[in-house]
Image: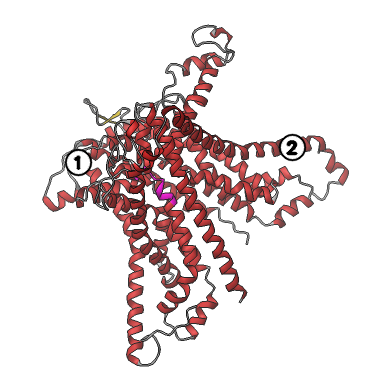
Amino acid sequence: MSTETHSGSGISGDDSLEAAHEKNRRVRQFLFGCAAITVVTTIAIFLVLFDNAAQYFFGARISEAVLEGDSFIRTITFTEFFTGTRWAPDHSTPAHGVLPIVWGTLAITIGAGLVSIPIGTATALYLSEYAKTETRNKLKPVLEVLAGIPTIVYGYFAVSFLTPVLVDGIATYLANPIGGTLDSNSHFAPFVLKPLAEALMGASVGRYSMLAGILVVGTMTIPMVSSISEDAMQSVPDELRNGAYALGATKYQVSLRIVLPAAVSGIFASYILALSRAIGETMAVTMAAGFNANLTANPFDEIMTMTAYLVSMARGTTAVGTIEYQSLFAVGLLLFLMTLMMNVINDWMKRRFQEEYR
Amino acid sequence: MSTKRAGEFLTGVDLRQEKVRNRVFHGLLVAASLFGLVMLVLLIADVIWESSQALITYDIDLWNFFTGTSSSRAPQAGFGASIIASFWLMALTAGLAFVIAVGCALYLVEYAPANRTTRLIEANLANLAGVPSIVYGLLVLALIVNDVGLGSVILAGAIALALLVMPIIIVASIESIRAVPSSVRDGAYAMGSTKWQTIRRVVLPQAMPGILTGTILALARAIGETAPLIMVGTMLHATRYPSGPFASFSAMPTQIYSWTYQADRMFNGLAALGIVVLLVFLTGMYVVAGYLRKRYETDGGSITNV
């Protein structure tokens, strides 16, 4: 592009040629260094989390044990950590069972998947198979805005709208579909709803609920499912569709029996990506679902996810060296390993189901 | 299949039922597509409603809001120090991430041999993009804030954000570097340029709009990130303007977060106003990125037409 001549860059003599080669070599090394930093980051995440988590379990960091000769003492057993059902490392009578917050994360992830997977897949089918080109070109970027909105905004949305209006409304309806207050006239409630409502209304809807968390995380992961699935559906060649139409298939049959199976690798990849995002989602979930480590299946209860625990500890600006500080890294390591596992599954599925039509 | 005659073949099909089924299916798909749209409209309407209510109810002084520092007393609280802190964060994040990310992309596209190391780097990129943002915060908290002893300062936050957005810039850079036609490279080589001269003077200028677009989109992601900053440690109230990279801070999203949790209802209104400001910044960044992308597309077209 630039046509100016640069002194010393020509092929005037062997010296400058040698210098140019030398420069090339150094540039190559520098660029390789840049690329290596990305790998170093992953290794650093793993080592730092592991090192600090070791202090939580064994009373000493591995780096301190190696460098300064600190000895390991068992402070928290793995049995307590992985099977205990109460999580309160910061309590005056501490408990270190991680199950409640792992359950919190799983409940939000599964619930969000139940929202975003069907809705995202249906949206992708609509965009790819049914919508006119101009509708698609307008709707797709608008939906992608959902993924670009900061999660703190979703959190605020949950606090100021979803919980007081929607979740509260659903809870009130479940308690008494006809209307009126909770305690009176409950005989109006149909047979199925009444026991359900009584079971659910044990705890009244407070500022936080699992349902609000599920709704915001489900909503923000819709575009991941719909965009990536739609790309996969678009890459299914028209010959397959036309072949099915020629055999007398309807549009509905083509969508479900031709396009969906043909695009399955991309669609599954989008599911894994959305679920993985839901696992690591922090602010929206914290603000919507709360800080109470509960082992509950009631969608109207307050729960605490692993990420919410990390935030709750940081909010109190935990001092270095305390058991609370160390527990951050044990939970963080577990979180990192969970998302790493999702990535590995994603990678495996991509290879397993790969069927490219190009 | 071929043994069935047409008459028998069609007897099993109730055309009316098929039509109904098709229509119901179509309706379901439209309804599902509208769900996302409805949530988006609700979210934006909610933010605008809450902030306008706050403006009316609490008579918020907008001048103080945009220039003042936050305070534990709601009527005095402003957003200015947080806006400046976010600017510092963005500048430092861009500075830290840009060179490394573009360098990594150049290596992968132009230099990397097809061997195990290269595959490792590529696989690792996909993995890094999937790491939850809060984990980057934990890494910086342990390594930079406490072990190195930097403290909860803007630079520490910027390091976390830079690590977080690096994969985004790398992927965007790889795409736009790959999009530079090889004929252009061959032309440069034919003129006697070395590999680095070709990259610096031909490939990079050609790929730069795409790389910049990717960088702006990455910064748009970074400006709204809250969790890593909370892990690194921010002030509950940004009570003073940050004096530089080594000042303690509270950026826009973290200030919004702590305002949301104050008991005084006026703080919640301030949070809504803060969200409006944050969304305006975001929109601005998306508009610039979109403009660059459009220009880039026409540039690329003219090159391939030559």
The amino acid on which the numbered mark 2 sits, given as a three-letter code, is Arg
Q: Badge 1 sits on which subunit?
A: A
Residue holding disc 1: A320
- Horizontally, is B71 left or right of A353 in the view? left
- One can see residue A126 in this view: yes
Quadrant hosting residue A253: top right
Q: Secondary structure at mark 2?
A: helix
Q: Quadrant of the C terminus of chain A?
A: bottom right
Colouring style: secondary structure
Name the residue nearer the viewer: B244 or B40.
Answer: B244
Q: Looking at the rendered structure, which numbered label has been put on residue B23? A: 2
**Vertical comparison of B273 with B245: above or below:** above
Q: Residues within 10 Å of mark 2 (few under 14, many from 20)?
A: some
Outermost residue, bottom side: A13
Magenta includes A276? no
Q: Residue B8 or B85: which is nearer the viewer?
A: B85
Task: In the rendered view, tell whether residue A248 sits above or below residue B13.
Answer: below
Q: Which residues are magenta?
A: B220-228
Looking at the rendered structure, the kind of residue marked 1 is Val
Q: CA distance from mark 2 to mark 1?
A: 62 Å
Which chain contains the residue that carries disc 2? B
Foreground tag (2 vs 1): 1
Residue A6 horizontal/vertical position (percent): 40, 84
Above or below A136: residue A200: above
Q: Find residue B68 and report its horizontal and vertical position in percent.
A: 33, 41
Q: Residue at x 61, y 77 (%)?
A: B306
